[in-house]
Amino acid sequence: MRAVWLREFGGPEVLTPGEAPDPVADPGRVVVDVAFANITFVETQFRATGGGPFAGTLPMVPGNGVGGVVAAVGSGVPADLLGTQVITSTGGSGGYAERVAVDAAALFLVPAEVPLDVAVALLADGRTATMMTRAAGLRTGDRVLVEAAAGGVGSLIVQLAKAAGAMVVAAAGGARKLAVARDLGADVTVDYTDENWPKLVRDATGAVDVVFDGVGGDIGAASFDLLGPGGRMVSFGLASGTWTAITDDEATARDVTLVRPAATPDELRAYTESALAEAAAGRLQPIIGQRFPLAEAAAAHAAIQSRATIGKTLLETR
């Protein structure tokens, strides 16, 4: 089968197309014919340095989230899964390929109302956005600042925060991304390539009650300064390359809570299922801004690192 190999850590160019053995459905497992593989920012970091939550022995096929059709089932797996559309995590490797073998328990059935590519776009980002918004304890009337508001997670948080009755300030870089955030329902948009952006937020809100920090670094620190007493800071990403460096003591001094969501595997599964249900009901729509053929995984990684992408980036295998 066709796959993309990672043989050394480095720039996007280290991702090279090639062949890999076809997986088999061992007991308790299934083989999925992959139609779409999602790419997360964390995967670009792993490719570059080997760091992050993933692990593997090189050479390896990277990729952690896919969607497709169940093509084979192992013993102990219900035969009626054959032919069903599913999304699944792969455990951190193997996703950039035409087929994957995974535990049957890891599958999510795709609702009939949800296109497969939309479901794949929600697999990781929908789970994260749902977890973060619930952890923030959003209340009607909260003034919410969403960084990276046109990204895969940020664009979903904008929608979930609006649905919770919040006033949403969307922060992103450039007119194109701000237009996306406005279309998703953001009340105010600010371009954080403008050095005066914190003043624009203060002018619009006075202070914010919740920050969803998807950038980290200096932008995350500036967002922290915009929180009023009783505010909550929820960090979900580090697009800048570093997490926001705020200590518990600094937060306490400002009467701000640093929200650090934690979840059990069952809770994580429930967050993904909730995102799929919201999409099926027409209340949550991921933005799929870029699609690349499987063989062009290197170009997809380069686009994400350049911050030129909008929403979710998918690889297409068919």
Image: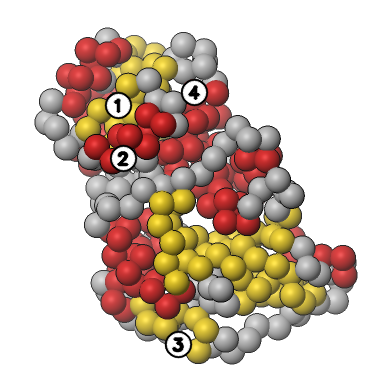
In the rendered view, does 262 fall on the left or right side of 225? right
- Label 4, label 3: how many angstroms apart (C-alpha)? 44 Å
Which residue occupies 27% across, 52% down? 307
Dot 1 or dot 4, earlier in sequence: 4
Q: Which mark is residue 177?
A: 2
* Front of the two marks 4 and 2: 2
Contact check, label 4 and label 2, Cβ < 8 Å = no
- Label 4, label 2: how many angstroms apart (C-alpha)? 18 Å
- Label 1, label 2: how many angstroms apart (C-alpha)? 10 Å
Q: Which mark is residue 189?
A: 1
* Front in this rendered view, residue 141 or 209: 141
Residue 101: x and y, percent?
66, 75
Residue 290: x and y, percent?
40, 57
According to the picture, the residue beneath numbered tag 3 turns out to be: 18
Element under label 1?
strand
Q: Amino acid at mark 3?
A: Gly
Give the quarter of the figure containing the N terminus. bottom right
Dot 4 or dot 3, earlier in sequence: 3
Q: Is residue 280 visible?
A: yes
Dot 2 alpha-carbon crowd within 10 angstroms: few under 14, some 14 to 19, many 20 or more: many
